[in-house]
Image (cartoon, helix red, strand yellow):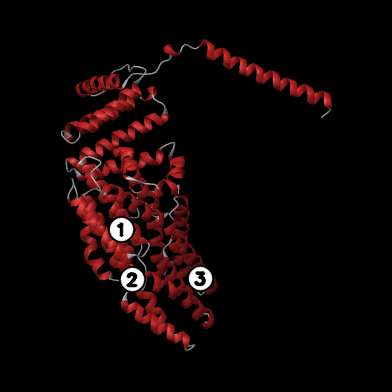
Amino acid sequence: MNTTSRRTRTEETIKTEELTRAEIERWVSDVVIDKLPLGPSLEESLKAARTLRRNISASGHSPLELDPYAPDTFYALCRLLMEDCSASPDLVLRDALLASESLGLQSCAFEDDELETLRSSLIFICWRASRLLFRSQETQHWEREYLLSLRRSPDWTEEQREWQVPDWWEGLRPAKVRALGDEGVFRTLMRLREEAEAEPRGVAIRSTALYRCLRGPAMFAADLQSFFQGEAARLAGATLKTLGRYQNAARWLDKAEAHFLSGADPDPQLARIVFLRLSILYSLTNVEAVLQGAPALESTFSRLGMEDDRVKCRILWATSLKIAGRPEAALEILESVRDVRPEVSPRLYGWILAEAADLEAICGDFRKGMEDLRRAAEILQREKQLTGLANLNLMFGFMCRSRGLLGEAVELFKASARDYADLGMMANAAYAQLLVAETYLAMQLPRDAEAAVLKAIPIFKEEGIVLDAFAALSILRESIRQQKLDPDLLRELRDRLRPGGN
């Protein structure tokens, strides 16, 4: 570019900037502040909300014409409904349902984000009213609807990013929790539940921090306070179970149970606690207890309308049958839930496919197993179910080992060990290391097998393993010292320390 053209370009830029400044100055000088539309006051919005509530109660829908401040009126209506919920949950549920329908009729009056926010608030009110009325099936319906609304939120990705900032949680104090408001705390708990499989270590820390802030003087209405405390404790127990800290998990589940028993409609949450306790028993290889308790628990989940939980129970039941040496029976248990895809979350369907694939391969249908495992991997990857993906590497490894592809199996087991370690699931990581050692033995590589076991031993010592497993581990360490690794003992130890599933 020559000097003349560069000078011309610069002069044009200066003129444009001067014009923009002039336009801004003229606009500011022309604006009369007193005439700016500031919207209605709080009292005006509440008055309009009371009128709206009377109208929709009487006619079943909102007025045909809403004023330009319709969002303020609906926000005020949500506030009124929450204030009345404890005293008149039946009337509040009726009016919240009518308000939700009228919101749909008047959706053109709202921005998309406003519409979704108001829908979420009305769903939350329906959830609370149903719970106060002990209508468990309705409560679970609204809980599912709230989660769907959360995932549809235009701000979901951005909120996730902000929500995961460590500083926010490190500075968490009771005043900060109170400032979230009742729906804000509920939303946070739902987010924690959503992230539990992707980041169990982080969710364990966050749910524990939230519980401690809720532990002091009550911040919310009694029914909400008991639920918030119970769910925070339950999530702490669930994620600690995933991390292999079973004793700590059991203590948190005891706390959760006490809180739920003191509140409204405890049965759904108590059933979830029973499921977690069965999962811990499975992790401690007490599969007979799981096989005894799973059928009744599945029936409870079905009665309460908790379809996702019912499917999880079936998966736990099937994996227990697999460990008990009954793969055909396990596959039969899973076949009955393979057709529930429209009724459960995609991530859960990925778990179903993964477990079914493993069983299909064990039962001899290797091609079908590999096909389903690949489909499961696609779903779990898309849904960011990182614990499920770590499990898939184990399953792929077992399939490769059964087909004599020992080198491939070793690499898959190593990848699984790394994934588990990244997630903080150290007991699972050590279990995967034992599989590496076992496969090295099959490859006639005893020194590599010994090295793999030696990597696992410090993890087991640090995590605190059961006494009989510790005795077996001591014998195994001695056999390594004598330069003669016992494959039978290695297999026995691996079976004793098999970590839990979903």
Q: Residues within 10 Å of mark 1 (few under 14, many from 20)?
A: many
Q: Do the residues under discs 3 and 2 have CB atoms within 8 angstroms?
A: no
Which quadrant is the N terminus positioned in? top right
Q: Do the residues under discs 2 and 1 have CB atoms within 8 angstroms?
A: no
- Rendering coords of residue 475 (x, y %): 39, 84
Q: Is residue 268 above or below residue 104?
A: below
Residue sitting at 29 percent across and 59 percent down? 314
Distance from Cα at disc 2 to Cα at disc 1:
24 Å
Q: Do the residues under discs 3 and 1 have CB atoms within 8 angstroms?
A: no
- Rendering coords of residue 250 (x, y %): 27, 62
Q: Is residue 472 visible?
A: yes
Q: Secondary structure at mark 1?
A: helix
What amino acid is found at the position of numbered circle 2 in the picture? Ile
Residue sitting at 22 percent across and 29 percent down? 95
- Rendering coords of residue 44 (x, y %): 29, 18
Q: Secondary structure at mark 3?
A: helix
Residue 237's disc is 1
* Quadrant hosting residue 385: bottom left
Q: Residues within 10 Å of mark 2 (few under 14, many from 20)?
A: some
Q: Earlier in the sequence, mark 3 or mark 2?
A: 2
Q: Earlier in the sequence, mark 3 or mark 1?
A: 1
- Judge by depth and name the residue closer to the eye, 135 or 332: 135
* Quadrant hosting residue 217: top left
Count of numbered circles on the image: 3
Residue sitting at 39 percent across and 82 percent down? 474
Residue bearing mark 3: 409
Q: Earlier in the sequence, mark 2 or mark 1?
A: 1
* Quadrant hosting residue 55: top left
What amino acid is found at the position of numbered circle 1 in the picture? Gly
- Rendering coords of residue 271 (x, y %): 23, 55
Residue 323's disc is 2
